Amino acid sequence: MSTAFHGAEFCWMNGDVIETGKALVSAMEPIHLGIFEGIKAYVENDVQSRGNLNIFRWRPHVERLRRSAAVCGMRIPYTNEELLEATRKTIRANRFDTNVYIQPRIWPKAGTPQDVHVVVPAWTFETVLGRDNQQFSKNRRFMISSWRRIASDALPPQAKSWANYGNSALALREAQRLGCDGAIFLDNRGFVSEGTGACVMAVRNGKVTTPPVTASILESVTRETLLKVIAEDLNIPVDVSDIARVELYASDEVFLCGTGGEITPLTSIDDLPLGKEYPGPVTKRIAEYYANILEGKTEKHKEWLTPV
Ligand code: PMP
């Protein structure tokens, strides 16, 4: 039995939970047309319900999956409830009891493109979270990519399609070649866009600013979540507006936000160190609060947690 897929023995494919090693398709599949989602489930760390697994913000993720499919001309033949059940079954079949990353994938079937394959793989991950752990405070030397983010009149960055990640891979490869940990894209107008797999937030004089959706970014669930809680729960001023490259350099703190990397502070951009303290105090405060929401430790926003 193969456990090659990140140690996940089972996945859900086209209606059934099957062994990951048997989730096989033809090499002739139109793989360039696929879309996907990245979703996480966290172990609850609340005094009353320690140990339960909760999917974070299931609804906006599944809605974005549906929007991505529509933009790319596909129809998902399952309801949101059926996809949720598929996800639960996959997690249970693998007997996961730690944090889980879920990555539903959809692409047209070879020969009958009106039909699609729907696969729900899931695997475990190490969290970054807002605790002052090594992952969170590790130095991150970033650069502005020489590659521009794909423009929405070429490949829509608002759809989570695999094709968009070719652009991300070029930027990441360039960054690694130059000894950096990652890259930030400018959009085709020259304004700050996003990271290769996360959105950007800049802190200056106590205010958090993030680029608008028109800056060629993915409509990030984490970004939307943070915009709400930073303003409403933490009373920190937030602004959605274009950021010029030099404004990013002049920021006191810059962090990335996304499902995968959660909240990841950056140490420098183009070797210009950010602020005086690393990770910065505003990033720390937001990350700590966000971590508590993910782990069900705050009474507020339990509606964002869907039990497995
Ligand atoms: N931008 C890109 C290019 C991404 O791949 C991701 C990760 N899905 C994000 C932003 C963050 O989106 P989310 O918060 O929904 O994970």
Image (cartoon, rainbow, N blue to C red):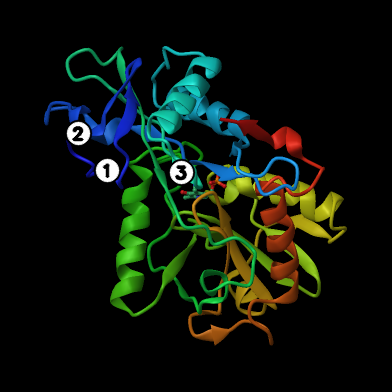
Could you say where residue 290 lies in the image, as x and y percent from the top left? Answer: 70, 54
Instruction: Find residue 78 and report its horizontal and vertical position in percent.
Output: 45, 13
Asked whether the residues under the numbered discs 2 and 1 touch, taking CB atoms below 8 Å apart as contact, a structural biologist would say yes
Q: Give the spatial CA distance, label 2 vs label 1.
A: 8 Å
Query: How far from the left and from the top, in percent, is residue 87?
Result: 46, 27
Res. 235 visible in picture? yes
Horizontal relation, residue 158 to residue 275: left or right? left
Q: Which amino acid does label 1 sit on?
A: Phe
Report which residue position mark 2 lands on: 21
Judge whether 120 appears above or below 163 on screen: above
Where residue 182 is drawn, which disc sits there? Answer: none
Q: In which quarter of the image is residue 4?
A: top left
48 over 106 or under it: above or below: below
Mark identifier at residue 101: 3
User: Which of the 4 image quadrants contains residue 266?
Assistant: bottom right
| 3 on left or right of 217 | left
Residue 153 position, x and y percent, is 45, 40
Would you call the spot at circle 3 few (<14 residues within 10 Å), some (14-19), or many (20 or more)? many
Determine the CA span between mark 1 and mark 3: 12 Å
The quadrant in which the N terminus is found is top left
Q: Which of 149 and 86 is in front in this view?
A: 86
Upstream in sequence: badge 3 or badge 2 = 2
SS for dot 2 = helix
Residue that numbered label 1 is attached to:
5
Of 1 and 136, the residue lying toward us:
1
Is residue 220 in sight in this rendering? no
**Amino acid type of the residue tagged 2 in the rendering:** Gly
Give the Cα distance between marks 3 and 2: 19 Å
